[in-house]
Amino acid sequence: MSEIVTRFAPSPTGLLHIGHAWSAILAHDRARAGGGRFLLRIEDIDGTRSRPAFVAAIERDLAWLGLEWDGPILFQSERLAAYADSLERLKAMGLLYPCFCTRAEIAASLSAPHGDTAPAYPGTCRHLAADEQRRRAAGEEHAWRLDMARALDFLSPAAEEMPEQPHHAGRLMWHDEAAGDIIAIPEIHGDVILARKDAPASYHLAVTIDDAAQGVTHVVRGRDLFAATHVHRLLQALLGLPTPVYRHHALLTDDAGTRLAKRNRAPTLAAMREAGMDGAALTRALRERRLPIGFRLSEA
């Protein structure tokens, strides 16, 4: 069996909270239980919100929890060339198109009923003529979207010829240690963005490429990212990348069931440390599923 490699990949856009601690501990312990490696990756390509001070705070928080990572920290901001190369490959395959729509325009286009399963983008720019796409892309800000239908058609005839890619009846799959074997249905997301107007790569593209580049064998992350894995599985197949084993764990919430988030001003690890809490004791308690007062686990 190959060495187990996991990672913790926070964005330096704020201070870590106890929900981050929960996820980091699970990823750390999954690697250590198998004698493997635990990596730290900083997802810092959001140039308007990422701050070096938050990177330093992440390191302090993990040390306070007693979690040690292996090797140097990987910074996404240093991997822009890798993202650009993958985007060019997908463009050459005819699977991307430029999107000029604003959020307001997309919201307006979705004001009419589309059904419960309608994707979040109606494909407005997909229908532009190729010459108009090229002309506008030369002078207008734009994102790059994956033509989902074309991507699925691209894979269909080759699915049975890819033994290294788990599939079932022509459909891509992944394995989740909690949920079992999952058939990928990326079409539920519609034409997802792979490069934003204000960032060189979307979360979907960057995380897929980086997990492969770092040799991550087991992705341990929150249940809120389960649906995103459908897209990541598709990108792995399109780019010829390996598929890790996944574990989408239960989320730590407040007593009302609200998911902890930076925007909700969840209690930070820095505040707990400043209040005199013992980081090692907190880690032991979380490992034993003994949650501090005011928190609970939720699968939602």
Image: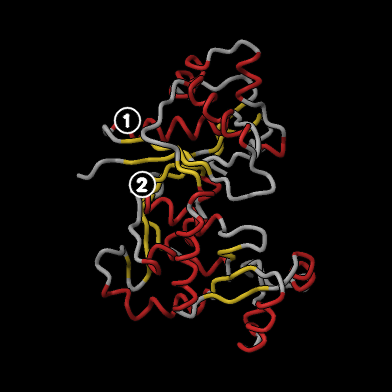
Q: Which mark is residue 32?
A: 1
The residue sitting at the top extreme is 276
| Left or right: 70, with 42 as reference point | left
Q: Which quadrant would the N terminus be assigned to in this image? A: top left
Residue drawn at x 39%, y 76% is 155
Q: Establish if 29 lies above or below 12.
A: above
Give the mark nearest the N terminus, 1 or 2.
Answer: 1
Q: Position of residue 197 (x, y in %)?
A: 66, 63
Q: Which residue: 64% across, 70% down?
A: 118
Distance Cα–Cα, label 1 vs label 2 = 14 Å
Residue shown at 45% from the left, 75% from the top = 152
Quadrant containing the C terminus is: top right
Residue position for label 2: 216
Q: Is residue 50 above or below residue 293?
A: below
Q: Mark 2 Cα within 10 Å, few/some/many (few <14, many 20+)? A: many
In x, y percent, where is residue 139? 71, 76
Amino acid beneath label 1: Arg
Residue 276 sits in quarter: top right
| Amino acid type, mark 2 | Val
Q: Residue at 54% of width from left, 25% of height from top?
A: 61
